[in-house]
Image (cartoon, rainbow, N blue to C red):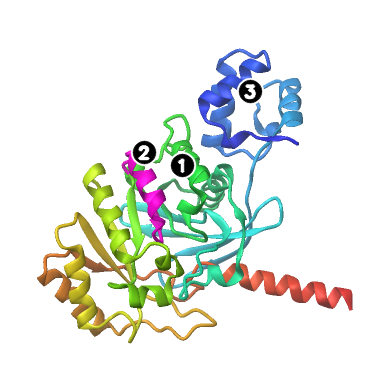
Amino acid sequence: MPEDIKSKTLPELQEAVRELGLPAFRAGQIYRWLHQSGVASFDEMTNLSKELRARLAERYTIASAAIARKQTSQIDGTAKYLLRLPDGEYVECVLMEYRHGLSICISTQVGCRMGCAFCATGKSGYARDMTASEMLSEVQTVQRDAGRRISNIVLMGMGEPLDNYDNVLRFLRLVSSEEGMNIGMRHISLSTCGLVDRIYQLEKENLQLTLSVSLHAPNDEIRSRTMPINKKWNVETLLKACRSYAASTGRRISFEYAMISGVNDSDACARELASRLEGMLCHVNLIPVNDVTGNSFHKSPAERQERFIAILEKKGIPATVRRTLGSDIDASCGQLRRRMEEEESTYAALRDE
């Protein structure tokens, strides 16, 4: 079975080139084609001989992602992509424009097994992990479609990044490589629902990325109702790991807090949250929860969000409401994939009748 060449680091590619009996400089040429040019075929590597391209094609495969569906917001230009992977699986990513440039939110797994109650992705279940090269392909495919350089990456799409730890770490090192796409770690944010053992493992990597933790509740009673992971690692255990991470790396942690009307948005919740985060290098990012088919959660009114922020800031906890982009398209990751799966299932049933 052909090897995944785009998931190889430059030193690994140099070793592979040496094994093929090729000059060392060929590794750099191939790496730049894969990462800077984002080619999908060895035939596009025009400064390599046809013989060499044929040898590479026999031994390796190049991961790719094709645009299956695209939605563009008429309000702010945010674009949501449904990408088809070579094995027929679908993942989603979102391209957003800010003053600092283009930012992409990518998926790290096909589906998710965390089962958070307010998330659309988990409702379709978990299929498999994504490879580092498939994550790179998300960025490259969307960047090619946009016709502009993407400068920021958020790992907050489908899947739990730390549940696919090794592939995600490899992706981070590849995408930040100076010989590759060269998107610096300080321009990358990784979101987790709270896999405590992996947070400690990530801490040892001492990467300069931003760690975003999906907290969504100030206590175990509320968090366990909406996030099954809390039954394994409760709020106290999670926040202890976060304090360790922030102290060790010197990087501020962003706590994601989905504001769900009548569930976690009371004054009492705000005060309890402020008490738990006191003294930590952190920021609270309030997110008006998306309406997701199949659950009864609704976003908190604007005045409730403002009141929540006022309580946090009075206690010395910096907080903001995340800017809502793409509100007129399927906002929540997982919904496009579910719709495509339903359409394909319906088509298959009709075809078989």
Q: Nearer the viewer, residue 121 or 198?
A: 198
Q: Nearer the viewer, residue 310 or 222?
A: 222
Q: Amino acid at mark 3?
A: Asn
Instruction: Of the two numbered discs 2 and 3 on the same chain, state the one appearing first in sequence.
Output: 3
Report the side of 267 relative to 191 (left or right).
Answer: left
How far, Cα to Cα, is label 2 from label 3?
Answer: 37 Å
68 is within the stretch colored magenta: no
| Rendering quarter of residue 258 | bottom left
The residue at which mark 2 appears reads as: 205
Of the 4 image quadrants, the one containing the N terminus is top right
Residue ID at (19%, 54%): 281
The residue at which mark 3 appears reads as: 47
Report the side of 277 relative to 286 (left or right).
Answer: left
Q: Which residues are magenta?
A: 189-208
Of the 4 image quadrants, the one containing the C terminus is bottom right
Q: What is the residue that sits farthest to the right in this orientation?
A: 353
Q: Amino acid at mark 2?
A: Glu
Residue ID at (57%, 72%): 123
C-beta proximity under 8 Å, tags 2 and 1: yes
How far, Cα to Cα, is label 3 from label 1?
Answer: 31 Å
Mark 2 Cα-neighbour bin, 10 Å: few <14, some 14–19, many ≥20 = few
Q: Secondary structure at mark 3?
A: loop
The residue at which mark 1 appears reads as: 169
Query: Compared with residue 26, is residue 174 higher up or lower down, i.e. above or below?
Result: below
